[in-house]
Image: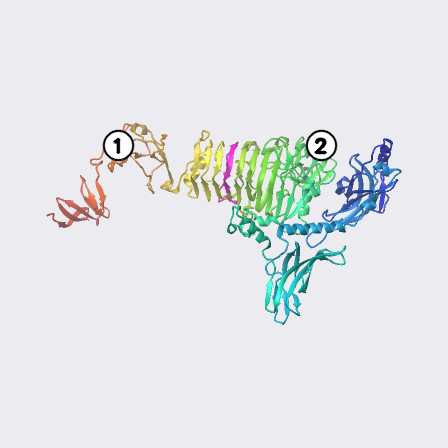
């Protein structure tokens, strides 16, 4: 091991002494330098190996050996790590000077984890310089602070015991733990294995304990104490004492505190008084709940939290006990943004043997980020921003322009990109090429940087543009920009695996839209996540250049979205991923000013919620959204595609000031429910309304439209109101006003009047109406017209509720030329048929009073009629009605 004072440190000592100023040395720096020989001499001009720094910590103690020698010390406790180091530096942050260096063999710093204890390391620097003790203002002898930690640790143990006693109760046991029971052997008893608390100290009896009594009555005591040594794990231990005397707590000859509790009284072989308290914490809760001033009854509260409390789609129990990982532990000297620390934390979480981890940011801070935070195959993880805000840096810090045209030529040439400043990148970054505005002017996929040589970047494949002007060429002046996602799966096209139960919550993301070079939807979404029972909740996301959240299998709930260049939620990543991720929710969010970049620029952000191929199994509910530049919902496609769109529920949303409710809805869409939404100044695309009319698999009901931005309003149409006429004719039913002027029907193919009461039909073509046409109420007409308009043969049918009359008006042949000559059938306004409790009556029928059985013009049919006061039965034979029986009237 070698140790030196640096030239810079020696100069600092001299300068401080000459100026009669105090010397401040305050920081230990730990690094792991590859290939370092700990036995070789150290160059006194050596600087901090910034790229290899693994940890830094304040100087914790200083000591004066003599006037010319002082000691600086720090302790790496068992909660610090894990990392390895072979370089230690002593640093003055006040003077920004590296004072001393030590090269050591590689040391592993471990961390305490379940089943294993982390190590504790002490590191000291002895500095010898004439008069340094006075120069540094150090007067304390090291003997006063290099103390045995036993007293401090004992104090910590005692504090833990007292806290457990205060919170859980002093003395209590779980179920039958430590219960004394009799045995078949005379005068012997056993203590049942289990768990209990004695004076707050948690004790466990793993095996049955046998007791033998010589006389009665006797008391059984459990004796609990904390024991261990410097090289072992300290843990509670128990012993049992049988005595007829009272025993109190005591301290043994080794100075160990013992806590004694009476758990049973034995008066005979079969007479045992159980003195244990088995209610413990439960009893305290019940007592509190049932206090007179309490507003709750004990019966209303279940202690079975796991069975009764759930947070969709990840259960509360799934996250309560997850292992906490603190981002602050991974911040290193020289970090300009939070990205490096965050990626270190993600890497660490992939290595720990826990079911779940919770990455926690420091509370209420503002951090910048400038890198792709790749979650890879990490699952069962919560990213808790803890009230902090993260803001994307301006792209100028992670982009550069090309300095020459790269021809499409060979694949090798197309993969070599020359940039003005290669220091903006590192190997492993994924980069886009951007040559202008819009989707056609950005490479379709990001490419990985495989190597950097001077200003030449070698990438994994040629850039490809959607437009054809450049193809795979990269023109001079194009921007090469690193892909930056706050949460991203990584890879050239994102990982095909899913991140099960991955949660992002409790903070704010600022996309810094003004500082980004592209608003195309493929560029730098804030969160890209393929999950199953994943969640994004209690977040505020604002000011994004393009898309906000892209993924499947997510519950996006209770968030705020403001001023987004693209969509709030885009169901994409892998178009074939939906079967393995399950459904998604977009619910109870507040959204204002979305899709500001417009569809023309983004290329694929058709709505506040946008669907890629293979979308569906999505619930959009209970959101309050306003001021969208594009429609509320994007394009929902056909279930017949290779990656089909299926199953969409849009319910109970307030949608205000959007161009339209939905950009496009496939005519054969499967399983779409649009119900109980309030649309304010938001219209509907005619194509969407036609799909709703035509498709019985689309339900649209209960929606309210208040204004429509000059477009048609969304109509609620049920299956019973859709009519198919023949094979290729559509009958559209709408509620309109009474058309009282016959001339208003002139040239009719589609009539429109604003009063929504009369039923009006438009028949496009000819054939037979195969379903009931419409139900008409009150004194209003329903009219059927030939396809040619008001030519001869037109007729009107009407019904009057007041006198229960059904009437017909016809236009005879004289109506040619458009002038209606309406006629009324004789008797057309009479009540021909009456039905009451006594039967059916035929009244006032001028042309006969017959009831027919079979077709009246087909041979073999029968009819019964009244003729001259007689009842006549006739059969149709050879085209004539032949009387078979006459019942004479008397």
Q: Residue furthest front?
A: 245
Query: Does 217 sit above or below residue 703?
Result: below
Q: Is mark 2 on a helix, strand or loop?
A: loop
Horizontal arrangement in the rendering, residue 46 relative to residue 879 (left or right): right
Residue 811's mark?
A: 1
Choose the circle earlier in sequence order: 2 or 1.
2
Residue 229 shows in the view: yes
Q: Nearer the viewer, residue 121 or 697?
A: 121
Residue 707's mark?
A: none
Q: Which of 91 and 307 is in front in this view?
A: 307
Q: Position of residue 371 (x, y in %)?
A: 67, 38
Query: Does 645 sit above or below residue 751?
Result: below
Horizontal arrangement in the rendering, residue 718 relative to residue 348 (left or right): left
Q: Where is residue 45 in the image (x, y as percent from the top left)?
A: 84, 38
Q: Position of residue 338 (x, y in %)?
A: 68, 38
Q: Is mark 1 on a helix, strand or loop?
A: loop
Q: Nearer the viewer, residue 57 or 644?
A: 57
Question: Dot 2, how many residues are within 10 Å of its Cα: few (below 14), some (14-19), or many (20+)?
Answer: some
Q: Residue furthest left?
A: 890
Q: Residue furthest right?
A: 130
Q: What stretch is highlighted in magenta?
A: 619-645
Q: Does the magenta stretch include residue 30?
A: no
Q: Does the magenta stretch include residue 623?
A: yes
Dot 2 and dot 1 residues touching (CB under 8 Å):
no
Task: Write down the quadrant of residue 272 in the picture.
Answer: bottom right
User: Residues under labels 2 and 1: Cα distance?
Assistant: 85 Å
Q: Identify residue for label 2.
A: 420
Q: Nearer the viewer, residue 690 or 180?
A: 180
Residue 614 shows in the view: no
């Amino acid at each position: 091991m070698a140790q030196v004072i640096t030239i810079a440190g020696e100069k600092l000592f001299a300068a401080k002494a000459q100026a009669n100023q105090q010397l401040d040395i305050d920081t230990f720096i730990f690094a792991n330098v590859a290939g370092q020989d700990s036995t070789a001499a150290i160059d006194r001009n050596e600087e901090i190996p910034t790229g290899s720094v693994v940890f830094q910590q304040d100087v914790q103690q200083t000591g004066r050996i003599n006037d010319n020698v002082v000691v600086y010390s720090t302790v790496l406790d068992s909660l610090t790590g894990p990392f390895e180091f072979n370089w230690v530096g002593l640093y003055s942050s006040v003077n920004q000077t590296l004072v001393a260096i030590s090269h050591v063999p590689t040391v592993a710093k471990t961390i305490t984890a379940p089943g294993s204890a982390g190590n504790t390391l002490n590191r000291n620097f002895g500095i010898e310089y004439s008069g340094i003790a006075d120069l540094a203002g150090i007067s304390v002898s090291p003997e006063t602070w290099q103390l045995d930690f036993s007293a401090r640790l004992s104090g910590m143990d005692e504090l833990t015991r007292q806290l457990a006693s205060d919170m859980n109760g002093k003395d209590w046991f779980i179920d039958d733990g430590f219960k004394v029971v009799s045995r078949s052997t005379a005068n012997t008893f056993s203590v049942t294995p289990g768990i209990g608390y004695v004076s707050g100290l948690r004790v466990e009896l793993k095996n049955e304990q046998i007791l033998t009594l010589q006389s009665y009555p006797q008391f059984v005591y459990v004796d609990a104490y904390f024991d261990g040594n410097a090289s072992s794990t300290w843990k509670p231990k128990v012993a049992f004492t049988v005595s007829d005397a009272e025993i109190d707590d005591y301290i043994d000859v080794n100075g160990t505190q013992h806590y004694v509790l009476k758990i049973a009284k034995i008066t005979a072989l079969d007479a045992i008084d159980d003195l244990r308290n088995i209610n413990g914490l439960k009893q305290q809760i019940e007592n509190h709940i049932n206090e007179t001033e309490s507003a709750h009854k004990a019966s209303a509260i279940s202690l079975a939290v796991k069975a009764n409390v759930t947070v969709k789609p990840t259960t509360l129990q799934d996250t309560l006990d997850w292992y906490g990982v603190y981002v602050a532990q991974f911040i290193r000297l020289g970090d300009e943004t939070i990205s490096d620390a965050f990626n270190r934390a993600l890497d660490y979480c992939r290595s720990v043997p826990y079911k779940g981890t919770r990455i926690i940011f420091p509370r209420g801070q503002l951090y910048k980020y400038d890198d792709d935070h790749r979650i890879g195959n990490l699952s069962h993880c919560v990213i808790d921003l803890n009230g902090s805000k993260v803001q994307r840096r301006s792209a100028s810090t992670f982009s550069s322009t090309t300095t020459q045209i790269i021809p499409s030529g060979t694949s090798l040439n197309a993969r070599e990109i020359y940039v003005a400043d290669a220091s903006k990148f590192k190997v492993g970054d994924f980069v886009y090429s951007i040559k202008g505005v819009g989707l056609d002017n950005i490479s379709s996929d990001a490419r990985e940087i495989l190597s950097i040589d001077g200003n030449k970047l070698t990438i994994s494949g040629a850039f490809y543009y959607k437009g054809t002007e450049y193809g795979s060429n990269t023109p001079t002046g194009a921007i090469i920009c690193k892909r930056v996602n706050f949460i991203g799966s990584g890879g050239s096209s994102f990982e095909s695996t899913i991140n099960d139960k991955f949660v992002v919550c409790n903070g704010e993301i600022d996309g810094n839209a003004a500082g980004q070079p592209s608003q195309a939807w493929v560029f730098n979404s804030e969160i890209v996540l393929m999950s199953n029972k994943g969640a994004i909740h209690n977040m505020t996301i604002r000011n994004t250049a393009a898309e906000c959240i892209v993924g499947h299998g997510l519950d996006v709930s209770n968030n705020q979205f403001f001023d987004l260049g693209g969509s709030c939620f885009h169901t994409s990543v892998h178009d074939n991923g939906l079967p393995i991720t399950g459904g998604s929710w977009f619910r109870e969010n507040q959204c204002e000013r979305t899709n500001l970049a417009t569809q023309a620029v983004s290329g694929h952000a058709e709505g506040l919620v946008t669907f890629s191929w293979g979308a569906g199994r999505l619930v959009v509910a209970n959101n309050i959204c306003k001021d969208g530049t594009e429609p509320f919902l994007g394009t929902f496609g056909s279930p017949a595609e290779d990656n089909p769109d299926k199953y969409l529920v849009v319910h109970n949303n307030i949608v205000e000031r959007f161009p339209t409710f939905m950009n496009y809805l496939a005519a054969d869409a499967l399983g779409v429910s649009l119900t109980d939404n309030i649309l304010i100044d938001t219209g509907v695309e005619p194509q969407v309304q036609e799909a709703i009319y035509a498709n019985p698999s689309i339900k649209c009901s209960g929606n309210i439209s208040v204004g429509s931005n000059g477009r048609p309003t969304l109509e609620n149409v049920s299956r019973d109101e859709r009519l198919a006429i023949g094979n290729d004719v559509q009958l559209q039913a709408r509620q309109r006003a009474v058309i009282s002027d016959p001339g208003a029907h002139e040239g009719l193919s589609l009539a429109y009047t604003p009063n929504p009461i009369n039923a009006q039909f438009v028949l496009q073509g000819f054939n037979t109406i195969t379903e009931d046409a419409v139900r008409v109420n009150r004194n209003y007409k329903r009219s059927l017209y030939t396809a040619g308009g008001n030519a001869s043969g037109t007729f009107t049918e009407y019904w009057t509720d007041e006198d229960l009359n059904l009437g017909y008006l016809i236009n005879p042949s004289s109506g040619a030329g458009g002038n209606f000559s309406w006629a009324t059938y004789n008797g057309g306004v009479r009540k021909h048929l009456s039905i009451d409790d006594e039967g059916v009556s035929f009244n006032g029928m001028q042309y006969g009073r017959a009831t027919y059985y079979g077709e009246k013009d087909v041979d073999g049919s029968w009819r019964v009629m009244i003729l001259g006061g007689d009842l006549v039965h006739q059969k149709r034979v050879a085209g004539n009605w032949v009387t078979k029986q006459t019942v004479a009237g008397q």
